[in-house]
Amino acid sequence: MRYYKSFILFSLLALVFVACDTDDLEKDIDALKDRVASVEAQVQRLNDEMNILRVALDGNKTITNYSINGDTYTLTLSNGETLTLTQGEVGDNYPSIDISEDGYWVIAGNKTEWRAKAKDGEDATITPQFKIDKNPDADGKKYWWVSYDGSTWKVLENGLAEGENNNPPLINKVEVKDGYFNVTIGDQVYQIPVVEGLECAINAEGLVDGLWTIAGGVEASFSVKVNLADGDLVRVNAPADWNAKVSEYSAGATDVIITLIPPITPSECIIVVEVTRGVNTASDQIKAKTISDSYWAEYQAGFDIKIGDVVINKFDYPNAKLLQDGETVPATGVYFIADGATVKKSGPVTDLVLIAEKKDNKYSSKISTTGNISLGNLAEGIGFLCKGVALSSEGTSNVYWFNLSGNIIERLYFDHCRIEFMIDKNFSNFDKTGSGIKNLLIESCHIAVPAQQATEERTVLFLRYGQGQYGNMTIRNNVFYCTTENKAVSLAPLMTTNKATVLEGINVCIENNTLINALLNHDNSTSGFMKIPYRKGWKMKNNLVWYDVALIANKNATASFLSELGNMETFDIEDLSNNKVFTTVEDNPLTWGIFRDNKVFEDNVIIPELTTPFVDGTLVDTEGKYTLKPEYQGIGAIIE
């Protein structure tokens, strides 16, 4: 359901429809349905063709069975995958797709960084996907978009999907002939063998997104579905130090077991299983990785360490160091903090990455700062990123801890960190013209806030955007909690002043956070987890508040998740759903809502529930620890 702050648009539409002739309207609707169906068919056909091309380029699968229904082929592959392909004319407007001489995708005339052809026996892992959508930079005209990961989409600059661009469909012709499924692309014919019953499909328990993780040095196994004839051969290819073996097998439909003992040290590899029948070979593969408890060991082994959208490894960042107890953190570089160590930091930060040595989320790698920490980065720099560490301060003369040096930083990321506020101090004051943060990520963190001493009702600020320009903001799966027993704190997690600029077209996602005795009633005029005028499409959902101390901050008893609805903005209620409030205070003086103003929409009010969402005996409120009851899974944070 959508709610509008103004009914002007609705009234104008009503006048237009009244003036329309019913027959003309029905014709327009039918024409629109035809156009939508045509677009959907174009997109489906192109993506189906890309899947077929992927199989043809890999060259390691066969077709065990196929059927034809009109112009539609349904193919069953040797690894159990089913693909469909529909031939015939479906529109005539496609982006140009090609493969470079060295085996990379060329999309809309531009060579990409993604391999199209297998190399050294390893499949190409990327199959581009396509969709048609509006291009906001071209007056909303429909363009082709491409994605290389299934979630991030990029518009093709010369990919106008309206009208004609004379680019034919990717596949010109398909036919089954002489034991092959022949696919013609341009002047090139690719062949996929049709071998009835030749199967090779890996089934590995614990496989997540194509990655199989197992303990180092411990025997593990997975099964492979096969349908063997007399004389078929089954082989497994893996690095020698993974000690992979094939179980005994015989003819018939059965499972073959692959056992292996990986190295103790961090390692990853591609395991390929092949079934050969005569001149044809069907294969399947998985990527395997040993489980490690050390980011530092994985870095040394060449593994990727992800912090948001950033990937840290020894190839792109070869000069990372492991800092020991008492050492000083430089302003720039990539540093791992030894387990149990406390390192020192003062002064400015310029493109700095700090990562805990261990992955156990015990926050035993600590950074202790002195004075204000001023954030900056070089042009096209990485920003300030922390993963798995605990941050605390020995003190600062200002009322805030972090600020900006005067330029716009690319990223401010805290991933699985513990952030320990100082008493009577704010976390940040980003308040310089010409500065800003392009991308903010606070994810799976424990954010510890002590009760205020100078003035108990004082509102503590986490992220204060005073001046500058600010982009995408994600605050997800965090626990904000008051560390002082039998106390609560008034907390403003995210806010701007009227001098700060929140950029257009950005994404804001605040979801699955837990607040324990961290309250959102701030003063007589504003309140909210996010004190920024809300824009359509931003998400504030699945957040959980629990308190047993009803602190009345600045004589204000109105608490909310959002401060206000932006001027002339609308919203989808689904984007603001499932925010829950729980309290043990029976004579609760606080009133709660999604927006501070209950007049924004009818169901704005949130009634606090006089129960606990936590399993009995699991809540340690001053440490932000708890276990959610089964019925409340899906709201609040779960940090593993």
Image (cartoon, rainbow, N blue to C red):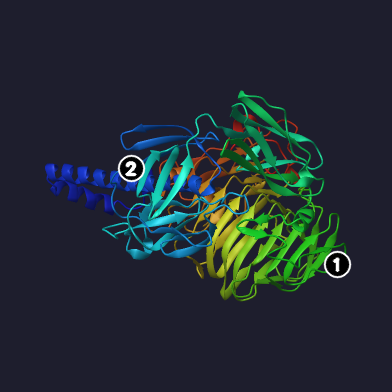
Q: Which percent across, then down, holds residue 247?
A: 72, 30
Residue drawn at the location 86% of the way across and 55% of the way down: 340
Residue 81 — which label? none
Query: How far is mark 2 from mark 1, CA to CA?
Result: 66 Å
Instruction: Say whether residue 328 is left or right of residue 132.
Output: right
Q: Which residue is mark 2?
A: 87
Q: Which percent across, then down, holds residue 450?
A: 74, 54
**Dividing the image into 4 quarters, which one contains the N terminus?**
top left
Front-lying residue, 13 or 147: 147
**Dividing the image into 4 quarters, which one contains the C terminus?**
top right
Instruction: Say whether residue 10 is left or right of residue 536.
Output: left
Secondary structure category for the residue under label 1: loop
Residue drawn at the location 57% of the way across and 55% of the way down: 474
Front-lying residue, 59 or 204: 59
Q: For residue 514, say whether it is visible.
A: yes
Viewer-side label of 2, 1: 2
Residue 601 in which image quadrant: top left
Secondary structure category for the residue under label 2: loop
Front-lying residue, 410 or 49: 49
Q: Which residue is mark 1?
A: 327
